[in-house]
Image (cartoon, helix red, strand yellow):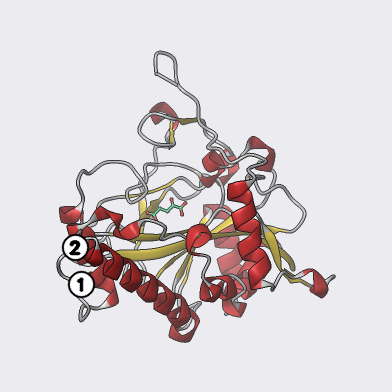
């Protein structure tokens, strides 16, 4: 998919754009199959441990995880890109349709940032508590989860649903047009979130979207998401791409080249090596992985 010049300008001004239909079902199916297999294995393990009773094997992708989560919160343990380290996911990080969009926003030398996640936001009715966390993120800029050295790095967030992402399901909300204001200070309290008095007074835009769409956000775009009021999971991936050679804001974790016009041989397509780099980053920790937040006066650090 190509973005039009108008769409690129909109992204540059608003720091937000939904690239509708950028991905096909065929692009996403291998990743979804890998997630299904992971969930199935975890469910079988938890059943063997007596932690869940019903495997809900006949339930569709958008419902099964929530029904398992309702029985045992441990179902989601390890279900993230860096921990699962699935081959289909690694291949998807190089997906042509995704990178064709990335190329228009960051240029022809593209690095995959190590800041990326799978999120299965279950129905709020199945959560133990509501409030800010991995499922309901408070207002923040992605610059707030990176080291300050990445401030000049054009890191673009690709948020993509694996099913419907409606308002009821807690889709992303963004504040448009904040790019030029740069970094806004974030506090620790309540999860990494923009200091309330600095939150721009802008009406939030709901990023309602569906499978195949990609929500694009700049590193300075404030965004948040709310509880899932439906009976289905809101599944998504959030990935980040940036120009090769600039700071990733996460030196503790491995980044890698996914496309290069000038040096095609620099593209990292070795799956085993990617797994090794992640394992090494966990076992021999070096570098920095931090949120750029700080306590306000009177708050506990
Ligand atoms: O998926 C969500 O609800 C939050 C995602 C997010 O904050 C991000 O991609 O930076």
The label shown at residue 250 is none
Q: Position of residue 153 (x, y in %)?
A: 68, 48
Q: Name the foreground residue: 178 vs 126.
A: 126
Left/right placement of residue 96 relative to residue 145 reads right
Q: Is residue 241 visible?
A: yes
Q: Quadrant of the C terminus?
A: top left
Q: Position of residue 116 (x, y in %)?
A: 52, 57
Looking at this view, name the residue that lies furthest to the top: 298
The label shown at residue 52 is 2
Q: Which corner quadrant of the image does residue 143 belong to?
A: top right
Image point (60%, 48%), residue name? 283
Disc 2, disc 1: CB below 8 Å?
A: yes
Image point (64%, 36%), residue name? 148
Q: Name the foreground residue: 229 vs 118.
A: 118
Disc 1 C-beta below 8 A from ligand 1: no
Left/right placement of residue 179 relative to residue 70 reads right
The label shown at residue 55 is 1
Q: Quadrant of the N terminus?
A: bottom right
């Amino acid at each position: 998919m190509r973005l039009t010049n108008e769409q690129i300008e909109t992204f540059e001004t608003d720091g937000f754009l939904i690239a509708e239909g950028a991905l096909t079902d065929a692009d996403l199916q291998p990743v979804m199959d890998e997630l299904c297999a992971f969930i199935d294995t975890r469910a079988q393990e938890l059943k063997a441990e007596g932690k869940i009773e019903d495997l809900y094997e006949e339930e569709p992708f958008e419902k099964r995880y929530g029904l398992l989560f309702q029985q045992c919160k441990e179902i989601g343990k390890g279900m993230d890109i860096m921990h699962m380290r699935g081959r289909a996911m690694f291949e998807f990080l190089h997906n042509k349709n995704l990178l064709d969009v990335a190329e228009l926003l960051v240029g022809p030398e593209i690095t995959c940032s190590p800041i990326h996640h799978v999120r299965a936001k279950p129905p709020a009715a199945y959560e133990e508590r509501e409030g800010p966390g991995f499922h309901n993120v408070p207002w923040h800029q992605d610059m707030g989860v990176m080291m300050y050295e990445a401030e000049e790095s054009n890191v673009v967030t690709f948020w993509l649903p694996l099913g419907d992402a409606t308002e009821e399901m807690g889709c992303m909300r963004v504040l448009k047009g904040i790019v030029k204001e740069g970094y806004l200070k974030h506090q620790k309290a309540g999860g990494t979130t923009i200091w309330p008095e600095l939150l721009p007074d802008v009406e939030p835009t709901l990023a309602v979207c569906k499978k195949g769409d990609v929500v694009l956000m700049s590193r300075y775009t404030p965004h948040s998401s709310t509880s899932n009021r439906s009976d289905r999971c809101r599944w998504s991936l959030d990935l980040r791409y940036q120009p090769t050679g600039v700071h990733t804001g996460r030196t503790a974790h491995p980044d890698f080249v996914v496309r290069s016009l000038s040096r095609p041989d620099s593209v990292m397509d070795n799956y085993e090596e990617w797994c090794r780099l992640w394992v090494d980053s966990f076992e021999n920790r070096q570098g920095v992985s931090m949120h750029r937040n700080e306590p306000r006066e009177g708050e506990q650090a």
